[in-house]
Amino acid sequence: MPNSLVKSARVAIPLDLVTKGGLSDWVAGLDDTGRTWAKAAGFKAGKGEALLLPSAEGAPAAAALGVGGLDDFWAVGSGSTALPEGAYRIRTALDAEQATNAAIAWALGAYAFDRYSDKRGGRARLVWPKGCDQTRAEAVIEGVHFGRDLINTPASDMGPEELAAAAQALAKRHKAKFKATVGDNLLKDNFPTIHAVGRASVRAPRLIDMTWGKAGSPKVTLIGKGVCFDTGGLDLKPAAGMLNMKKDMGGAANVLAVAAMIMGAGLDVRLRVLIPAVENSVAGNAMRPLDVIRTRKGITVEVGNTDAEGRLGLCDGIALAMEEKPELVVDCATLTGAARVALGPSLPALFANDDALADDLLAAGLAVDDPVWRLPLHQPYRRMLDSDVADINNVSPGGFGGAITAALYLHAFAEDTAPWAHIDMMGWNTAAAPGRPKGGEAQSARAIFEMLRRRYG
């Protein structure tokens, strides 16, 4: 159970969630001391604005938190940091969904990455809201916290081996099966592009393969880009571009976050998680520009740029996933800067070969305030990936439609074998917002889980 949420407290301060429209009625319902204090404090019920009300004796009697609305997912996301340390219980009437969202948002707002320096300090704690779906809330909180921790950990402590160990620990916790194909065994087992991307690092590349659930349940496969650090390879990134590349395994962190949610909530699916875990380094055996690699699917790929390595690892994972014809496949990747230019840092790009899957993901993302935005798999752009010597190039010339051509590259390996969605994400909060501290973020993880929960919950 997250320590920002408690089952009960000997003394819990009543907490009112107040909208600007309801401010006057709320003030009118206070006693004389409360009204005087609220007026003196200038409380306007702005989003995230907190107020502690004293009793006539001066002890904390109640608290208020300004919210945009009770249906706002992040309504109480700033509560754990805006309110003084102590235990609180929400006094405002909430329905079951509002109560569940409140618990999740509170705990996500209380997150702090303190592995190397304890900057957490005191935090306000919340008594689990009445009517809350605690099982679902705990699953989502565990997943997001886990994903954030993975992304925030520096590459010195989060290489391919450490990422595999984290996935294995998650598998053990939920009694899932775990397998890792490591180093030259990738070549023996026909994962040549994963090997090509990671072979230059002293930290051996590997394919993480985790399965959970009943054999007869619907097969759901999640694939995550696990580039634990990306130098760009021989097409070396500049210093500014390399600075935050510890987050280039954000796709892997994202699918592990979703897996934690699925297993924690006990969804009726046969889950498979595939993660090509590599470090894209520079060495004498690094893949070179214009090398040609024969992929698992048999498609030959000309390496137009060694800094477009994520899609090379993913293509072998997608090919493997499609071999068992699952009910649906979702891959997540911090894949292109082009998607960030188009949609900004907090709105992941969604591509899909199936309209129903895309529509369900869009609706789920809006429902839990974890939105994605669909971009087209515009087939006329496929010719931009043509190669003179191979079946396909891993990049297109120039900067036009970079997120689309990257998705089209992956689609060449997914085809229409099964409903497939590709999410191109940043995996990082560039600035703090209620419930979303600055740093690593499991973007779209809650949207994917909500889509699956609606289908299989």
Image: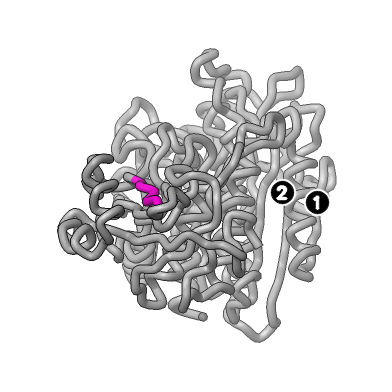
Residue highlighted by disc 1: 181
Label 1 with label 2: CB-CB less than 8 Å: yes
Instruction: Give x and y (percent) for residue 334.
Output: 50, 40
Q: Is residue 72 magenta?
A: no
Element type at mark 2: loop
User: Disc 1 and disc 2: Cα gap in Å?
Assistant: 9 Å
Residue 391 visible in the picture: no
Q: Is 288 on the left or on the right of 311, as rendered?
A: right
Residue at the image position 82 percent from the left and 46 percent from the top: 182
Instruction: Give x and y (percent) for residue 292.
Output: 61, 34
Element type at mark 1: strand
Sort mark 2 into few (<14), some (14-19) or many (20+) by Cα contacts within 10 Å. Answer: many
Q: Amino acid at mark 2?
A: Phe
Residue at the image position 62 percent from the left and 59 percent from the top: 142
Q: Is residue 385 above or below residue 231?
A: below
Residue 434 visible in the picture: yes
